[in-house]
Image: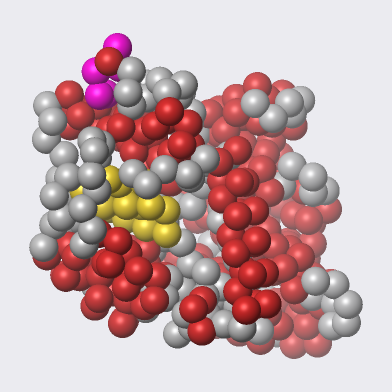
Amino acid sequence: MWSNVVGQERVKRILRQALDQRKLPNAYLFTGPSGTGKDAIALELAKALNCLDPAMKGIEACDQCENCKAISTFASPLMQFIFAIGKDSEDASKKSDDASAELIDIIREELAAKSADPYHDTHIPKAIAISIGQIRELIMLLSRSMGGQGKRVVIISEADTMRAAAQNAFLKTLEEPHENTIIILTSSNPSHLYPTILSRCQDLRFDLLSGEEIADVLEHRDGIERQQAEFLGRLSGGSLSVARSLVNQDVAELRAQVVQFLRMGLTRSRKNALDEIDKFLPRRGGAFLEKRQNVEQMLQLLELWLRDALALASGAGSVVFNVDQLDALERFTSRFGNPAALIEAIHSVHAAKRNVALQLQLRPVMLELVMDLERSLVSTT
């Protein structure tokens, strides 16, 4: 079922049963790490609900009929796809004409990329929130009769980026379901959503993808040599989008820099740590987006390193990602192997990743991370 979606057989089985029995809730909440297929399955569900091929029996999508093609290209009135396009409290409607035209072009480019690859992380430069304006437009749209046949599907990608005003406005839509409409929220950080929103959605948790599943995609769909695909599959931490972001990187060099950054950060030398930070963040030149992507990759590899150290410290060496760096990991763990301290350090990396996603200034974020890691790991040795 749904060959466009990698893995997630448990999720597919649950949705197939719901479709077969015609017992879908008014609202779903798809939760799980980025790159595990939440948006991809939401799009497949929208197609399955509106596929015109009777042979599919409303359980799968044929990918050939008019409705399936229109939904796949984000051109169908039966499907609304919403994602962050503005700053914290900014509405696109308040921008200048030139800025609005530029934003529309970027949105089209992002949707085209998402159509080609449902695992593409839609991203508008400096956009961090789904605005109140977007939610008001959605409410107005839902108030109109659909006309004709079909099931209207609203997908709100990374719904946790809705700020307070947007969540409050959206809550009424959940409290008063619209006829023949299903709403799907996807979120990597569901704790940022109001409990009242969470309680009105049926939660469906997505698992991390296996290294083998990711390697198969990289090899057969992306044309990556098998050995490299397996290496990236291990380092991806279960996220296809992370694996793809590392395809054109010198991963060995990047990982060496990450380990050096960690080493300098734990020597209590601020200057050494800042020097390492500036290797990722040259003070002058370079696009902000490129810098942010560099830091995101660094933080991903840093988190995997700390998770591997925690696995070794807990006697679970069989689940280590960086298997080719086992000697270095064992040396690190012998010195900084307090499980509670490693868990605290991983939480610090999560906080840094969140702040980078919020597009805060990168150098202060990384400096704060250095201090947090020192507090967590060095103070326990």
In percent of width and height, residue 100 lies at: 60, 74
The answer to whether 376 is drawn above or below residue 186 in the figure is: below
> Which residue occupies 62% across, 46% down?
113
> Which residue occupies 43% across, 39% down?
71
> Which residue occupies 60% across, 38% down?
116
Instruction: Decide whether the magenta segment is chiefly helix, strand or loop.
Output: loop
> Which residue occupies 56% across, 28% down?
212
| Residue that sits furthest to the top in the current view | 55
In percent of width and height, residue 365 lies at: 62, 81
Res. 264 in view: no
**Is 52 situated left or right of 368 in this image?**
left
Figure quadrant of residue 165: bottom left
Res. 55 in view: yes
| Residue that sits furthest to the right in the current view | 285
Figure quadrant of residue 277: bottom right
The answer to whether 213 is drawn above or below residue 274 in the figure is: above
The stretch in magenta equals 55-59
**Is 16 situated left or right of 268 in this image?**
left
Magenta segment: does it hold 58?
Answer: yes
Figure quadrant of residue 45: top left
**Is 300 situated left or right of 69 in this image?**
right
